[in-house]
Amino acid sequence: MKDFFKNGLEPLSYLIYAISIFIMLRRNKSVRREVLFVFYLIAIVIIWVACYTTNIKLNRLLYNVYFFLTVGVFSYYFKSLVIRRFKKYIVNILLVINLVVFINTAIISLQHFEINNYFYAITYLTIVIYTLLYFDDVLKNVSELKLLHQFDFWLVSGYLLYFLSCFFIIFFYENIDINLRATLWSLQNIILFLSSVLTISASIWIYRKKYY
């Protein structure tokens, strides 16, 4: 069971995310959802291999690739989601910052086989900022369509739950006793699973209500 929480729960959560988005694509196809769907299919493979490989270098390389993909895909998703041009500029700036940090860490400093928790923390914080930009739009631009019937609202809510919680976990990860790190990693996966369950529950409910 401990092995499942540490390794199996993460790719399972991405599978649930993929199914959630696929359900909504059956009702309303959009490029940003298609991009997210493909991203989660790739994430399932990358994370599954990373979790179960016995090669430590491959594990770390795959996680670095995953975080690089994450910041790129999520930047695209939120840039297409937010309304004001100023917020789109903020997304672009944060994307560039993440890319610079990644290039410096993984390529220039040759740490592509190393886990850099501060780089991961920057990525988590970036996505938290993206979610806050979206929720600011939601508060300022209330549409006739009920908020609880909007899939993006539930999806972003799940993201905020996960990325905000894990920002604090990953930021202090190196300072935690090594014996507790597996527990923290499992906790992070449990939060990811809860956010994915929230998302698929919303997608099924919206699908049945025929709101999208």
Image (cartoon, helix red, strand yellow):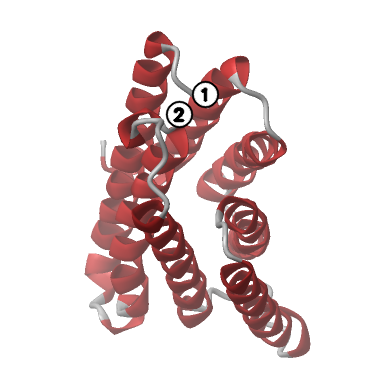
Q: Is residue 195 left or right of residue 66?
A: left
Q: Residue at x 53, y 44 (%)?
A: 52
Amino acid type, mark 2:
Ile
Residue 35, compared with residue 168, is above or below; it is above
Depth check, front residue: 133 or 100: 133
Task: Please give the residue where the numbered disc 1 appears in the rendered image.
Answer: 19
Q: Residue at x 29, y 66 (%)?
A: 181
Task: Please give the residue where the numbered disc 2 appears in the rendered image.
Answer: 16
* Residue 50 picture location, percent across and down: 58, 50
Mark 1 neighbour class, 10 Å CA radius: few under 14, some 14 to 19, many 20 or more? some
Q: Quadrant of residue 36?
A: top right
Amino acid type, mark 1:
Ile
Res. 6 visible in picture: no
Q: Quadrant of the N terminus?
A: top left
* Residue 202 picture location, percent across and down: 35, 27
The reply to whether callout 1 and callout 2 are in contact (CB within 8 Å) is yes
* SS state under label 1: helix
* SS state under label 2: helix
* Residue 149 picture location, percent across and down: 37, 28
Q: Residue at x 28, y 74 (%)?
A: 178
Residue 138, compared with residue 175, is above or below; it is above
Numbered label tally: 2
Res. 176 visible in picture: yes
Q: Is residue 122 left or right of residue 145?
A: right
The residues tagged by marks 1 and 2 sit, at their Cα atoms, a distance apart of 5 Å
Mark 2 neighbour class, 10 Å CA radius: few under 14, some 14 to 19, many 20 or more? many
Q: Is residue 59 left or right of residue 156?
A: right
Q: Is residue 96 left or right of residue 154?
A: right
Residue at the top extreme of this rendering: 208
* Residue 124 picture location, percent across and down: 45, 67
Q: Residue at x 52, y 23 (%)?
A: 19
